[in-house]
Image (cartoon, rainbow, N blue to C red):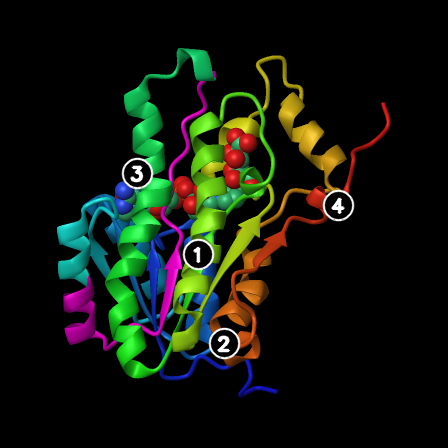
Amino acid sequence: MEELFSLKGKVAWITGGAYGIGYAIAKAYAQAGARIVFNCSRQETVDRGLASYRQDGIDAKGYICDVTDEAAVRDLVERIEKEAGPIDILVNNAGIIKRIPMTEMDADDFRRVIDVDLTGPFIAAKAVIPSMIKRGGGKIINVCSMMSELGRETVSAYAAAKGGLKMLTKNIASEYGGYNIQCNGIGPGYIATEQTAPLRETQPDGSRHPFDAFIVSKTPAARWGVAEDLAGPAIFLASSASDFVNGHILYVDGGILAYIGKQP
Ligand code: NAP
Ligand code: GCO
């Protein structure tokens, strides 16, 4: 059983793996035996990530690289292969969100979200697939979202990108499954991280943010998720336990997508 879920000797590249969901996945992978490499677009975030890994006793390598820059990603993959070894597992975790009502959103803001959240995973996957094919296989895990399935006010670009990422996942599985590459999505529900902090902020009158109460009522588990809730499912999708699972989106949402919501 231990062998089925082991990542011993594997190299795992987690984009944006400095904190939050990416960090929790990377930490779990390290505990399962993988060597961790990650990248962020800014030096301060890389340094923050490196400090956390050091504190947790994990020997991770961190690099600056914007996932939307195809040439830089190609160079980064070459560098990772030299410094850590060929990449066995890619987790496309780096992402951004801009919460702006659609009719007030500039096309440039829309394009940037699509670029980071959808084109970035395409660029990173494209950069690792040839070497995975040569070595007989690999695992690609795309961090999707509730917004891969659902819409809501203010998140048009994010929903379009994460919906697209779900379909990119299925297409990579379709196109490269024959090379023993499994590409699956992991779809976090509402997770208490910095990205969602504005949705949980206490109101000026001291009351709970209405969105916070709304999410708890919409989640059968009756709580926000924590980044560590993603650890087990992410290990499953990176390990040989999932070798015949391909093009699947594993939602880790405390049941949100199963539930119509509480009757008012
Ligand atoms: P986050 O705040 O979204 O963290 C993003 C990470 O990505 C940071 O390390 C950031 O570093 C990096 N990043 C952003 N743009 C980048 C770029 N262009 N190139 C390279 N790295 C970049 O953290 P999170 O909340 O843990 O979210 C992680 C992922 O899960 C995202 O894809 C998010 O959409 C998804 N997700 C989150 C939730 C949630 O409830 N929190 C739920 C579902 C899905 P830099 O700023 O230095 O670039
Ligand atoms: C929002 C949130 C979400 C979540 C997440 C849900 O504003 O609705 O930020 O989009 O972060 O992706 O799975």
Q: Residues within 10 Å of mark 2 (few under 14, many from 20)?
A: many
Residue 171 numbered tag: 1
136 up-or-down from 192: above or below: below
The earlier-in-sequence mark between 4 and 2 is 2
**Could you say whether the residue bearing mark 1 is in a helix, strand or loop?**
helix
Q: Is residue 30 left or right of residue 201?
A: left
User: Separation of disc 2 and disc 3 at Cα?
Assistant: 29 Å
Q: Position of residue 69 (x, y in %)?
A: 18, 46
Decide if ligand 1 comes within 8 Å of the CB at mark 3: yes
The earlier-in-sequence mark between 2 and 3 is 3
246 up-or-down from 207: above or below: below
**Could you say whether the residue bearing mark 3 is in a helix, strand or loop?**
helix
The earlier-in-sequence mark between 1 and 2 is 1
Residue 239 numbered tag: 2
- The answer to whether mark 3 and mark 1 are in CB contact below 8 A is no
User: Separation of disc 4 and disc 3 at Cα?
Assistant: 30 Å
Q: Position of residue 52 (x, y in %)?
A: 36, 58
The earlier-in-sequence mark between 3 and 1 is 3
Q: Is any atom of residue 26 visible in this view?
A: no
The three-letter code of the residue at mark 2 reads Ser
Q: Nearer the viewer, mark 1 or mark 2?
A: 1
The three-letter code of the residue at mark 1 reads Asn
Nearer to the camera, 245 or 40: 245
Q: Residues within 10 Å of mark 3 (few under 14, many from 20)?
A: many
The earlier-in-sequence mark between 4 and 3 is 3
Q: Position of residue 131 (x, y in %)?
A: 25, 74
Residue 115 numbered tag: 3
Decide if ligand 2 comes within 8 Å of the CB at mark 4: no
Q: Which residue is mark 4?
A: 258
The three-letter code of the residue at mark 3 reads Asp
Magenta highlight range: 77-101
Decide if ligand 1 comes within 8 Å of the CB at mark 1: no
